Image (cartoon, grey):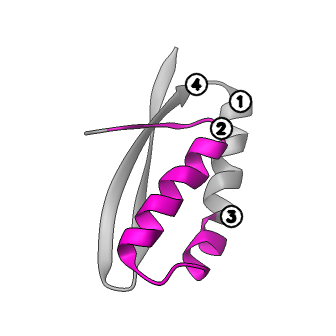
Amino acid sequence: MNRPYIICLKYKTWRNELWFSAPDDELTHQRWDTAVELLPEVSDRCTSSNQFMTEAVEHFEQYGFVRIQR
């Protein structure tokens, strides 16, 4: 069964909440923690909030999370 994984992105003064869906199991929880921990590396290479949002979504998708609109 899938569950939502939610993160609040922040880039300078911009903020946005993103929702993802993935299985509710220990391995997925560990992948989520890793993806969140590495997110500042994504932010560091971005030059705008739009770029950060796009790359953050791709980052989480690489870890197996599917973005859902909420």
Which comes before the other along the chain, label 1 or label 3?
1
How many numbered discs? 4
**Label for residue 38?**
3
Identify the magenta region.
39-68
Which comes before the other along the chain, label 3 or label 4?
4
The percent coordinates of residue 2 (x first, y second) are 50, 21
The percent coordinates of residue 33 (x first, y second) are 66, 50
Residue for badge 4: 24
Which residue corresponds to the image point at 30% horizontal and 77% vertical from the top-left? 14
- Between 59 and 33, which is closer to the camera in this rendering? 59
Labelled pair 1, 3 in contact (Cβ < 8 Å): no
**Label for residue 26?**
1
**Residue 40 higher or lower than 47, as above or below:** above
Tag 4: residue type? Asp
**Residue 50 higher or lower than 58, as above or below:** below
Q: CA distance from mark 3 to mark 4?
A: 21 Å
Secondary element type, mark 1: helix
Tag 1: residue type? Glu
Tag 2: residue type? His
Which residue corresponds to the image point at 31% horizontal and 63% vertical from the top-left? 16
Magenta stretch mostly in which secondary structure? helix
Secondary element type, mark 3: helix
Question: Which of the 4 image quadrants contains residue 8?
Answer: bottom left
Q: Nearer the viewer, mark 3 or mark 4?
A: 3
Q: CA distance from mark 4 to mark 2?
A: 7 Å
Task: Tell me if 61 is positioned left or right of 66 in this view.
Answer: right
